[in-house]
Amino acid sequence: MDDYRKIGIGLTCAGVLFLTLGLLLFFDKGLLAMGNILFLAGVMLIIGTRKTFRFFFQRRKMKGTTCFLGGIALVLLGWPVIGMGIEGFGFLNLFGDFFPIAVGFLRNMPIIGNILSLPVVRSLTDRFVQKARLPV
């Protein structure tokens, strides 16, 4: 792993931390803005600028990209509640394909896997995992 990816992971984690703190402190626009900027900068350093551009501007993901970036713009302009709502919708549209893969990975972990194997939880998570398709 090169230094850019290490820095990218740190920036992404810091972005998620700032976003979480911004939400916990009743949509503090300064923290949310910093979290958004750090998150995007971290993603760009992890996967590279060209792959980031290709990921965000695919035809099938344009609605998610528009909502995600529009929500960030609204947060930066001082409308944090509306911006985070729109940004959340865009985030689900952009990164929703990764959730089934993450659930499948979490099922193989020691403690979390036992919780996800409970009948009630398993029936809920099976709905997501059925849609999972690996890009192989």
Image (spheres, rainbow, N blue to C red):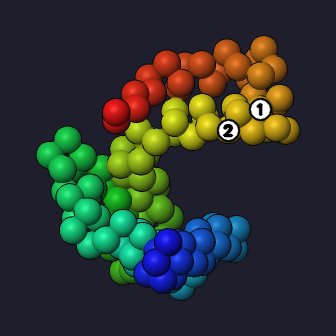
The image's mark for residue 35 is none
At 81% from the left and 20% from the top, the residue drawn is 118
Task: Please report whichever mark, 2 or 1, sits nearer to the chain's N-terminal start.
Answer: 2
Please, is residue 9 above or below residue 126 in the view? below
x%, y% of residue 19? 58, 70
At 71% from the left and 33% from the top, the residue drawn is 108
The image's mark for residue 106 is 2
Q: Is residue 13 left or right of residue 34?
A: right
Q: Of 30 and 38, which appears nearest the observer?
A: 38
x%, y% of residue 135? 34, 35
Q: Is residue 26 visible?
A: no
Q: Of 112 and 82, which appears nearest the observer?
A: 112
At 44% from the left and 23% from the top, the residue drawn is 131
x%, y% of residue 57? 19, 56
Q: Is residue 52 visible?
A: yes
Residue located farthest toward the left when viewing the structure as drawn = 59
x%, y% of residue 107? 69, 31
Please, is residue 92 above or below residue 124 in the view? below
Q: Is residue 136 left or right of residue 85?
A: left
Specify the amino acid type for callout 1. Answer: Gly
Q: Secondary structure at mark 1?
A: helix
Q: Secondary structure at mark 2?
A: helix
The image's mark for residue 113 is 1
